[in-house]
Image (cartoon, rainbow, N blue to C red):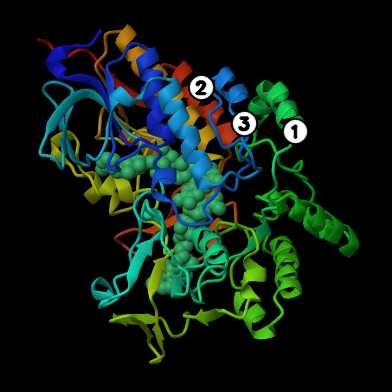
Amino acid sequence: MTDKAIGRDVIIVGAGFAGLYMLHKLRRQGFDAMVIEAGDGIGGTWFWNRYPGARCDIPSMEYCYSFDRELQSDWRWTERYAAQPEILAYMEHVADRFGLRDGIRLSTRVTSARWDEASDTWTVTTDNGESLTARWVVMATGCLSKPRLPDWPGIEGFSGEIHHTGDWPQGGVDFTGKRVGVVGTGSSGIQVISTIAAEADELVVFQRTPSFFVPANNRPLADAEIAATQAGYDALRDKARASFLGFFELPEANPDSALDASEAERAAQFERCWNAGTTGLLQAYGDLLANEEANDKAAEFARGKIASIVSDPEKARLLTPTGYPIGARRLCSEIGYFDTMNRGNVTLVDVRDAPIERVEGKAVVLADGRRFELDVLVLATGYDAMTGALTAIDIRGEDGRSLKEEWADGPRAYLGLMMAGFPNLFTITGPGSPSVLSNVILSIEQHVDWIGDCIESLRAHGQTRIAATPEAEAHWVDHVDEVAHTTLFPKAAGTWYHTTARDGRRVFMPYVGGVGPYRDYCSEVAADGYRGFAIGEPVPA
Ligand code: FAD
Ligand code: N01
């Protein structure tokens, strides 16, 4: 099937959950595909994020592939929320089980990709100076794979150890007897803080925006529980695929308004949903993410939980989120974070009013002159999310247009799958798809299946080119924005769900219309002859 004149059929960039499954799917379909991965191991997020405390916050039995029944029933997760080593071990197992390793080139970063109009092919260049050609390119580069590093003057010269959570040393870090600083209190920050506090001599937490948290309620999985889920997997996964968030283990969403319930009913409902963990609290009422007054009831409930755990009233005040709706920034899943804040060796430093200004030797210096001498500085400062890994590659489409340049006005994509002007280039969980607002693995599988089926259909019809039309893309981008504005997501400042366009506009990137409706829409588009895509005939020899 491979036309050797064009090199490979498909180049896939990234060996995380998306890249591994894409390779497997395409090979099963008889395509000649390869993966290029910057890291020196597979696993993506779970290769890079080896910081102590890293684990998933979607139940392990859902945060794994569903494409293979036997894989699902053979693998035994040990905890409700698996820790990083276990998730990475699972991915290594998948690579071996499906014989994927010989299709993956490690330690190689893709630096550019250039479309050739004459041959309907892409030429991909790597940091090894190599050029590879393929008909199709799939960017499985991840939504949270490009760490965001602060640009404080002096940071390069920090004379202690410095690590970003998303680029953690493979050999680990010894915190024993050390003074450690952690910057950032999002999902990564709270996980790493809870773990380091027990090891370090002193821990200084630099917090800019307090996050809302829900308890993870992690626990070992019992054999009976595993067996029950495995026996019901088919139906459970179908339920997840049709659901709003892409997972099944959530309290049933209550469509009623929080404002119609009595105080006592609300308290009981919030308590029940709070204890379910993950995003359970947001399922408590149908209008929590749409109506500010309703949202504030849930926010007040969550704030009360903080006050009930943190004994120092000043610390509790600083840790209490205000000024944005609960759920509009990522809800963090906590294991002992607030208890950690009660420890004598943990200092909480509010850097909202006096930000970190510079680094000098081993000291972090704030704008008000306060200095913190540290042996280890941990940056839990997040990611250039959703677009960062893509714009880091010099991608040139039709007429040499640059993706980075075009996206400076806000990312534009049709269904988060393809961009007008960039034929034969697919993105997995790209902007405009549910991606990070879902069980990402289920969303990855849906994209991989759609892309694989699309390429197969083109091959069957002897077609060598597909591109999103500008009209379909514009319509989808407007729709994504319109749906976001029916929710409270746009009300939260400074979240990584948004990017800022060149003209200062805030652009909300994920699609909040729900995993189930989105999946149906993508399937309809395909069934309707790939509506909204322009499909080209073979290039004459
Ligand atoms: P990634 O796993 O990010 O893999 C992308 C790969 O592409 C990386 O290995 C990267 O090195 C490679 N790459 C990027 N650019 C290039 C290039 N130019 N050349 C070569 N290679 C390149 N999601 C959930 O749904 N539930 C969770 O509980 C959850 N927990 C998370 C916990 C952490 C700490 C983090 C950071 C994220 C979490 N996520 C979670 C989101 C997570 O990123 C996804 O679930 C999933 O792992 C993404 O897989 P991926 O293959 O799309 O991308
Ligand atoms: O990153 P973040 P993350 N000075 O962007 C602060 C997934 N994930 O790595 O909010 C001081 O959320 C920043 O402050 P502010 C999950 O999807 C999941 O924690 O910008 N502070 C914020 O507090 C998650 O949402 C898990 O004011 C600075 C923090 O750094 C996503 O990955 C675990 C600063 C960054 O928080 C990203 O999470 C881990 C500065 N100069 C990750 N710059 C699970 O539990 C940044 N900050 C499943």
2 or 3: tag closer to the N-terminus: 3
Q: Write down the quadrant of residue 469 in the picture.
A: top left
Residue 494, visible in the rendered structure: no
- Judged from the image, the secondary structure of the residue bearing numbered disc 1 is helix
Q: Mark 1 against mark 3, which lies toward the viewer?
A: 3
Q: Residue at x 24, y 35 (%)?
A: 421
Q: Write down the quadrant of residue 447 in the picture.
A: top left
Q: Which residue is mark 2?
A: 524
Q: Residue at x 53, y 68 (%)?
A: 199
In the picture, the quarter occupied by the C terminus is top left
Q: Residues within 10 Å of mark 1 (few under 14, many from 20)?
A: few
Left or right position of 114 against 324: left
Left or right position of 229 against 161: right
Left or right position of 43 against 211: left
Q: Amino acid at mark 3?
A: Arg
Q: Mark 2 against mark 3, which lies toward the viewer?
A: 3
Q: Residues within 10 Å of mark 2 (few under 14, many from 20)?
A: few
Answer yes or no: disc 2 within 8 Å of ligand 1: no
Depicted 40 relative to depicted 228: above or below: below
1 or 2: tag closer to the N-terminus: 1
- Judged from the image, the secondary structure of the residue bearing numbered disc 2 is helix
Q: Mark 1 against mark 2, which lies toward the viewer?
A: 1
Q: Which residue is mark 3?
A: 76
Q: Amino acid at mark 2?
A: Glu
Q: Which residue is mark 1?
A: 225
Q: Residue at x 70, y 55 (%)?
A: 288
Q: Amino acid at mark 1?
A: Glu
Q: Residue at x 68, y 35 (%)?
A: 248
Residue 279, given in percent of the width and then of the height, sits at: 66, 50
Residue 451, given in percent of the width and then of the height, sits at: 39, 24
